[in-house]
Image (spheres, rainbow, N blue to C red):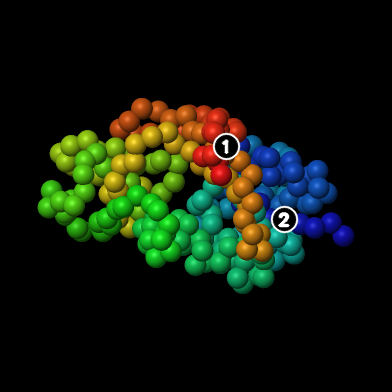
Amino acid sequence: MKKLILIFGGGLGQLTLIRAAKQLGVISVVIDPNPDAPGRVIADFFYCVDGNDYKKTKQIAIKHNINGIVTGQMEKPLKIMARLAVEMGYIFHSPEVVEKCTNKYIMKSAFQTNNIPCAQGKLFKQNETINPDSLIDMTLPVILKPLDSFSSQGVYKINKFEEIKDFIPETRSFSSDNSVLIEEFIEGPEYSIESVTYNKKTTIVQYTQKIITPFPNTVEMGHVQPAKLENERVS
């Protein structure tokens, strides 16, 4: 019998997953909050499901006797997916790992605990006031970002302390609990390293150089793959 996979998201970023499922002979069951998601027309089954509707998501998984779950280019469904994996026995990241990956402060704390170099930063919760004394041990410029958003939403480079009050309402709006991080700014080009971790072994599949808009708000406009890096920097 053919395997069935539940694909979270039917947008442009997930079309490759849906097509890959077809090529592999796997039945695709796609869920997306947008009833007109482009993946609808190529999915074997499509359901319009709110991104926070765990009950309906689980009902669909049970109805189709799903064998596995996947998403791509999206962080929002990861917590629901981790919960579903625990309850249904799917292979996926644990809820603890997902929390560390999506909460920037918890991620930073994990890096520091394991002596992994990272930008130094401070957490400011919803009702905490940010004043010059709060940042006395940090040097401008700094980066202001939401606690747990993605795609550079609400991320700003701050050159003068007075700029924080201009940007922080928007930055807080992208955070699930209005908390923000202020981090040291690290000068230089921006790269990402794409990898796959399976059975505790991590394999690097691509080095990516990012093309971004000018500061203060940076958004990815394109990528260079593979990045043009000297061999000694790659190693």
Quadrant assignment, res 107: bottom left
Locate residue 19, reporting x and y percent.
Answer: 74, 41
The secondary structure type at the circle numbered 1 is helix
Quadrant assignment, res 125: bottom left
Instruction: Report if residue 77 is visible in the image.
Output: yes
Q: Which residue is pictured at 54% across the width and 33% down the height? A: 229
Q: Which residue is pictured at 61% across the width and 37% down the height? A: 12
Locate residue 32, reporting x and y percent.
Answer: 59, 48
Q: Is residue 56 above or below residue 194?
A: below
| Contact? badges 1 and 2 (CB < 8 Å) | no
* Disc 2: which residue: 5
Q: CA distance from mark 1 to mark 2?
A: 39 Å
Q: Of callouts 1 and 2, which one flags the residue occurring earlier in the amino acid sequence?
A: 2
* Disc 1: which residue: 231
Name of the residue lying farthest toward the right: 1
Q: Which residue is pictured at 31% across the width and 52% down the height? A: 120
State which mark lies toward you, 1 or 2: 1
Amino acid at circle 2: Ile
117 and 105: which is toward the camera: 117
